[in-house]
Structures are given as structure tokens and as C-alpha cells.
Image (cartoon, rainbow, N blue to C red):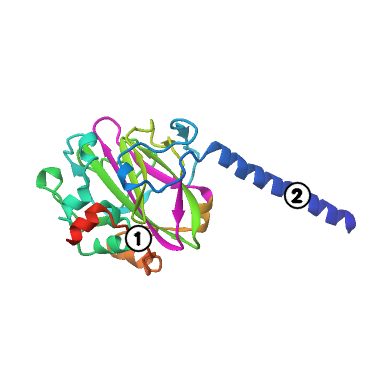
Amino acid sequence: MKRAHQLMLAIAIIFALVVSSSHLAFAQKHKVNVKGGPIPEKDWRQEADVENGAGLAENHADVKDWISKWYGPDGNYENNGTFQVSGMRDLIDEGTKGKLTEPKLSTIAGLKLTQTVKMEWAKKNGGTREWDIFELDVANQDNMNRDGPADNIDTYVMCVIEAPKDMKSIFSPAHDDWAQIWVNGEKWYNDRTWTGGAQIVHYNIEVDLVKGGNVVLYRCGESGGAAYLNLHFDSDTHRLCQIYPDKAKDQKSFFSEASRALAVDPAGKLTSTWADIKQDQ
């Protein structure tokens, strides 16, 4: 009996070491190289504040947690005049005539407004867009196209992360070309450089999640060639949190399945940006 106990103890220790080593290997492979966010408003258009050098160019093709299901406008902003031009403008503000802005849309209050506020871009830019659920093929380097023009487009996608507690998380984006990401009304990521592949990542960004619902708004603008947008979080986030849309197939079922996460808007997370102040005047 004593020998059996010792054997079981040895197996438990070996298992713990393997799990610990696996976690360490993941941490080393996917190094966090952007910390200290969110980005101050004055620096919103500047490149990522990188620790220890430039972008990593990591291949995350082996990651199983890429998010494929999203909520957002059911078509792209078209004829953007190149991403360098469109990326300087708030296309959410323009399309809703100030009822929403990019920072506000990335809050629970802003997300809820999409149930009544349509995206009405000019006809040459895609016209009226409904808010809907859609899927992106995470391995497809042209997944932004969505049956529209292949070049000179901007894509907006959203998801809600329901966290069981306040926690640190890490997100890893792949994109072509200019990517900008907001979480809970604050901007956490800005990179004008394409990453080199649909599952190639330049930056692993540390972000704060609050207990309950966290709204993620991910925008990517591109000009020519490949057109992809992808995102995953660290394995702990995917294990501990619920991400919506999950089973939802349309706007109504999305808000239904995410209702618990959207019940309370996190205090202090609706930022007073210049665009929001202007809107209220």
C-alpha cells in the first residue's frame, strides 16, 4: 500500500511538472511585448509601445483559440482612399452621425445602441449596414473581403468577453493592414504594419478585463493584396471566460446569449473622449 501511495505521488509530481513546463513553454513562445496600456488619447495614432525591440513575427498557426465568430456591420466600409487615409478618421462616428464613436461602441452602453442605431455610410462607401453575426475563416488571408471589394476597405468586428473576475489578459492580433483595438472604451492597440500572414502575430498585448462583460472592438483597414483580420487571447482567458457571440446566429440571439454579461456597464469605463464630449454638446 505504501509503495502504491509513493507511485501515485511520483506520478502526480511528474504530471505537475509537465503541466508547469507546458505553461512555461507557452509563455516563452508567446512573449508579452506590449504592456502599460491603455494608450493615452494623444498617442492613439502612434505605433505600439514595444518592450525589448520590434514586432515578434510569431507564427500562431498552432493556436486553437482564434476567434472566428463576430458581431458587427454586415459589410465593410468601401473605397476608403487607402488605409493610411481612412485610419485617421472615426468611421463609426461618420456612419452614425455622432450617435456612436469608436470608443463609445467598445462599451456596453454603446454596444446596446446598435440595436436601434444603423450604420449609414455614403453609398460609395457601402451604404446602410445592418448589425449582424458573421464568421471569418481564420486561415484565409482574404477573410476581410466578405463578398465585397477586395481592396481599399475597412472592417469592424466585435465580441464580448464575460470574465469571472477582474483579471489580466493577453490578446494577440494578426492583420493586414492597419489594426486598431478598443476594450471597454479605451484604446489598447495601434499598428499600421501588416503582420505577414493570417496567423502571424507582431505583438502580444497585456490588457485589463473587468468582472462581467468586456466589449472588444477590432478595426482593420487595408489597401491592396491580402486582407485579413484575426484575434485570439491567452489560453487562460479562453479557459476561464465566455466569449460571445457563441451560438448566436443574428443580432437578437447575440444579445440574448450575452445578456448576463451586458447587464451592468463597468463603472468608470465609459471614457470621455473628445468625440464623446462633442457629441453631447
Q: Can you give x and y, in whole percent of width and height, for residue 93 in the image?
A: 20, 52
Q: Can you give x and y, in whole percent of width and height, for residue 180 in the image?
A: 32, 43
Q: Can you give x and y, in whole percent of width and height, for residue 178 in the image?
A: 30, 37
Question: What residue is pinned by disc 2?
Answer: 13
Q: Is residue 31 left or right of residue 159?
A: right
Q: Is residue 165 placed above or below 220 in the rendered structure? A: below
Amino acid residing under circle 2? Ile
At 40% across and 68% down in the image, what residue appears? 260
For marks 1 and 2, give the CA distance: 42 Å
Quarter of the image with the C terminus in it:
bottom left
Residue 101 visible (yes or no)? no
Question: What residue is pinned by disc 1?
Answer: 248
Say whether disc 1 or disc 2 marks the residue closer to the N-terminus. Answer: 2
Residue 167 visible (yes or no)? yes
50 magenta-colored: no
Span highlighted in magenta in the image: 206-235
The secondary element bearing badge 2 is classed as helix
Q: Main secondary structure of the magenta part?
A: strand
